[in-house]
Structure formats: C-alpha cells, structure tokens
Image (tube, coloured by chain):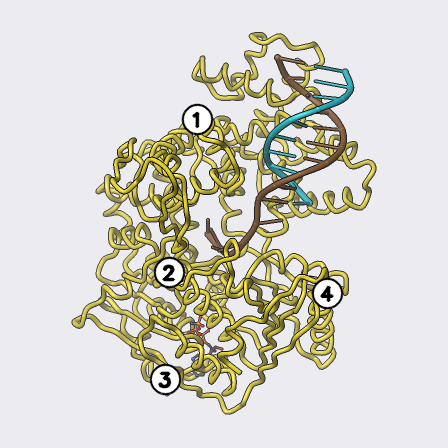
Chain colours: A yellow, B brown, C cyan
Amino acid sequence: MRKVLNEDNMSNKNLPVLNKEQLEAVNTIKGNLLIIASAGTGKTTTIVERYVNMIQNHGYRPDEILMTTFTNKAAKDMVSKIVKRTKFEPPYVGTMHSLFMRILRVNAQSIGLNPYFTLLDNDLDKKKIIKLIAKNEGIDPRADNISYLLRWIGKFKNRGILAENLSENLTIEDIKEKGFIEEALDDEIIRIDPQLRKKVNKVYKKYEAELRKQNLLDFDDILIFTKRLFETNKEVRDYYSQKFKAIMVDEAQDLNVVQIDIIGLIQNDNLCVIGDECQNIYEWRGSSPELVFSFNEKQKKIVLQDNYRSGKKIISSVNKVINAMKFKIDKQLNCTKESDGKIKIEEFSDFEEEKEYIVNKIKKLLKEGVSKADIAVLFRINSIGKELERELKKNKIPCHLSKSVNFFEREEVKDILSFLRLKINPYSVIAFERILVLMNGFGKGTAKKFEEIAKQKTCSLIDSLKLHSEIKLSQDKTREVHKLISVIENFSSNPITLFLKDFGYLSILKSKYREEPSKLQDKLENIETIKELFEGHESKKEDIKNFLDGLIEIDKKEKTKDRVTLSTIHSAKGLEWENVFLASCNEKILPFYFRGELDPMKRDSELRLFYVAISRAKKSLMISHHETNGWGKEYERSSFIDLIE
DNA sequence: TTTTCGATTTTCCCT
DNA sequence: AAATCGAAAA
Ligand SMILES: Nc1ncnc2c1ncn2[C@@H]1O[C@H](COP(=O)(O)OP(=O)(O)OP(=O)(O)O)[C@@H](O)[C@H]1O
C-alpha cells in the first residue's frame, strides 16, 4: 500500500496545505533529493512531512531514518514538530555531533579509543593545553600567540587535515626568516611572525598527542573519529549504512568537509539534502556548500521560493538584502502573505536606553495579549544577550538564554562537571587540576607532582593519588587525598551530593564567598539547576557518562516553557517568531569587526547573517541600535540598515 | 617551595 | 565574571 499525499487527503487541521513543490518533495522518498529552500519557504515543514510520510505510508521505522540538524535548537524544533504529528520521539534526529557521539561511544574500542573519554568542550581548556605545549617549544606564551595556534588547530581539524599527515617542520618557501607574513585565517588576513607560523604543525601534533593521553576528545574529534570509524571498519560502516535506510541533512550549506565525508560514507542512495546557500553563516567553522552543489543535473532537485512566514514589508526588505549580496545565485522570495507586517528602526543614545526600550516594548506586547513564546530578541554577540537577560529578569519577564552562555561558564558549574568528568575519565589532567586545587593546601605544585607519578607509573591520576607516599604530605593532607579518592571511586551514591557534602565543596564555596552573600546565593541557585538536570540519573559510571553526553545537546533538551527567547542570530537559524527584536544593530557589531577591521569577504557573510536575522520575523521586526557606549565612545548605526530603508 | 592574594586582562559566532 | 600572573605569605 503506497499512499501518495495530495491536497485532498491532507486533512489534518493543524497542518498547512502544502504547495506543489513541497508535496513533490514529501512524496519523493526514493533516491537522492536536493531541496533548495530560501528562508521561510517551508523547508522545515516539508521535511517533517516527508519524515512522517515515510513512517506512516511507506513502512520506514523511526530508527531507520537519520535526520541531522545544524544546531540543537533546530533539533528541538524538528523533534517537537515530529512528535506533534506522530506522537513518538524520533530517535535519530539531532546535530551530527550528538548523533555521532552516541555511535562513537558504542564503537570506541574498534578504533582504539578508550570508551570512557570525556569532552574538551571549551576554548579556555584547549588554550591551557596549547600554552603548556607552546612553553615547551620555546614559544612566547602570550595570549595572542596561543589564540593563533588554537585557530590554526581548529582550521586543520574542521577541514579534516590530520596531524599524522603533516610534516613536523614547515618548509613553505614563502615563509620568510624575518619580519611578518600575511596569511588568511578564517577568511581574515592577519599578520604573523614567521617563526611562530613555522611551529604550527608541531604544536598541532603535540596537541593531538596530549588529548589522546588525557583521553579527551574535542568537538572536531567527534567528527574526525566517526569518519575514521567508518573508513577503517567496514563492518561498522555496513551496519550503519544498512540501518539508516534514509538520511536527511538539513542546513547542508553549513557542513564542513568532514561532515560531508561521513554522510558520503554511510549514505545509501536515499539521501535528502536541504540547504540555502544564502544562509551559509559558518565558514569560520570550515563550512563549504559543496554538498549542495555536488548534485548534478541528473539528480532530482526541488526549489522552494514561496515564503509563507513574513509580511510583505519584511519580505521586501529581505529581498533587498539578497540583492546586496556579492556572491549569490540570483533569486528572490515570493511573498504569499496578505498582511504587510511591520518594520521599525529605532535609535537610542546608549545601550541602557536601548535595553529599556526593548523591555518596555515587550511589556506592552504582553499587555496586548501576545504570548511570550511569540517574542524573540536576537543579537550578534552573546555579551549583549547576557545584558539583555539581566535586564529582562530585573523586570520579571520570563526569558531564556542558552545555558552554554551564562551557565556552563560559571565556576561552580565547571567545578561540578569537572568532578563528574574525573569520575569517568581519571586521565583528564584538566579535570584533575581543577578538583585538586579546590582542597585547602593543594595547589598547582602538588598537582604537577601527582601528574609526574602518573607518568612514571603509567597509571591514571586517581591511581597516582594512592601513591601519595612518594611525596611527603602532612597527615591532614593525606586525609584529604584519601577523601578525594573515596568520593571519586564511589559509584553508589549521588555523585553531586558526594561532591557537595562528602568532598565538602559547599563549605569551600561558602567560606570563599562569605563576604558576598548575593554572589553566593547566585552560585547556590546554579548548583540547584545542575542537581535538577541530573535528576533521573543513577550513580553508576554509565549513568554519569550518559548525563555528561547529554549536555552537548542541552539546548535540544531544554523544556518548552512560555518565555521570551534570547538568542544569537546563529542559533536562531531555522526558527521563527511573530515578533522579533534585532538588538544593537551597530556597525562593528553587525557586521562584526574583528580587532577593529572588516574584510570585504567577511562583510558578505555578515550580510547573510543579517538576512537570517530579519527573515525570522513573521509579523513585526524591531531593529534597534545605540549611538554611544555611555562613556562618550561613538558607535555608528549598522550600514546594513541602509539597505532596507 | 608552594599556596594564596590581588591587580590585570580577556571575551565573536557553535558543536 | 573568571582566568592569569606576579608578589607576598606560609
Ligand atoms: N504550504 C504552506 N502553506 C502555508 N504555510 C506554510 C506552508 N509551508 C510552510 N508554511 C509556514 O511557513 C512558515 C515557515 O516555514 P518553515 O519554518 O518550515 O520554513 P523554513 O524554510 O524552514 O525556514 P528557514 O529556511 O528560514 O529555516 C511556518 O510557519 C510554516 O507553518
């Protein structure tokens, strides 16, 4: 029984009637398919229906369809739309990182990975590792040198260039002996000391070696190791390529080559690629729209151009922005909505006033009966988001900012997570140092001694603690060490309670902040939040590991509540709201000027970001900017606003 | 020698 | 707001 959907049998009330192209995409369930869809043309709607169609009418099981999104917020949106239609949770819908992480955990051993690896998930920890390497290599560990090396390592990794394939000594001819060289890094031209440039490969190799030693993976490694898994292990590859009878890849214009290669390895001639080259905003992560363009004439291609999202005025502005792009495929959006929609551009003397305006305007909307879930405030940089969050909270407006911004970077949250990570991965020097120095009388020196023991005896850092007699410790300190060992190796009580009570973190924190009660209160609240997140998890090693793995898709797991959304433009991609604020639309912020400069290439990509931002609005779009920072420093209005006026 | 304290610096975007 | 580095304290 093969059912073809058409306009008559699509009787579901809460479903829009799909147009001809959308229906064709929904009904094309054999072979490869490329869907090119500009903003708001219903690509999410279409692929959700395609998924539902495959399940309900063509005998696919949910665990046979792999659907990848680019951000966790988009994954959450996709999942909730599928749940609405089918009443079950789709098991393989998520970001590539979260889906492949699951596959890697199961298959770690077959590529020589210790399955108890933990994630190296922030730049600060990466820099710590790089800095140590730099010092050993005789490189001046200045902050900008370390950032430079980090950026190069990132560039290698998200382009799939492996350390093992690089020679240690660079012999590129145009690397001069003295002076400066100019080079492009993430589309930015930077001037750099050739002596430093020469050491990039070596540092990269050492960085990789260090991560293996500490049993850490960074985000790029999740992809690199998945690719290696499928490349080197035919059995595993066959298993997954047969398991996933159909694959759908959303936001394909933003994939990097490693991601494209992985899809190539497991796809089984039922690959649906969805993309919009005007929404490519992740070149800095090595994205290349080549998967979108690799589709040739013979393969099926469907273009969606009718916008169902925004009012006429908004669409006309969006089209003006598309016209202003230098590199684009000629296209325009057709507006299908009858309503005009509203665009307002407001100027304020400083950021304080701008925030006040946004708060008051939101209050007014809420008074008029607008739901909080229909309001979003978008911004280019998170620091603006943090300030907006504070302002909204002060005014008792329920709002939500991604936890990765203001939550996972807090010291108490990092401390708790380090403790959990150390329980899973006792080779992580990063986690070990963080925990050890919390104890009174223990500092970096002692940590280094234990690390040395671990190295000598080739044992884990926790095992090195047991050899504490090799370094003279006072009785008090010995007792502390034993306490730490016992809480780390205890897998029967709640690990967070172990840390807070048995290890004594709560009293450490309370004494550290005894003079700042409000700060302490704040920290205690964050600790409560972590406890809540952990609820429902057992204390066994596997459970803690699963909890930690779950954190990489925290934005997908976030409960839907009625509250105002605060989001960067990047993570707002694919989503929509009735009322959208675009805050601090200033030159140097959007477009963002890195170190006071803006490369013309970058400008186009910032413009695409602006395009994404303004195309999120259904009914009203409020763009605001400010003239000074409050201390007299002048800010210009974004030149992008000129385009739409 | 190692820890602790206080002044200084660092913050683009995401997984 | 937190990490870092040098100087003071233990
Ligand atoms: N055929 C249709 N008729 C009426 N409304 C539609 C139709 N298709 C989609 N829509 C509506 O248009 C809006 C935009 O759709 P959707 O979010 O699927 O677009 P999108 O292509 O994913 O956008 P973007 O590329 O910006 O992420 C949604 O509110 C959706 O319900």
Q: CA distance from mark 1 to mark 3?
A: 63 Å
- What kind of residue is marked 3? Asn
Point out the frontmost of discs 4 and 2: 4
Q: Amino acid at mark 4?
A: Glu
Q: Is residue A419 visible?
A: no
Q: Give how far across and how far down residue A518 sits, in percent.
A: 80, 46
Q: Is label 1 or label 2 in front?
A: 1
Residue A527 placement: quadrant: top right
4 and 2 marks in contact (CB < 8 Å): no
Q: CA distance from mark 4 to mark 1?
A: 46 Å
**Residue A39 placement, left or right of A550:** left
Number of other residues with Cα within 10 Å of mark 4, as a class: few under 14, some 14 to 19, many 20 or more: some
Position of A417 relative to A280 (above/below): above
Query: Residue A155 in the image: x percent, y percent?
Result: 37, 47
Residue bearing the label numbered 4: A352
Q: What type is the residue that disc 1 sits on?
A: Gly
Point out the tag, 1 or 3, that comes first from the N-terminus: 3
Q: Nearer the viewer, mark 1 or mark 3?
A: 1
Chain letter, disc 3 residue = A
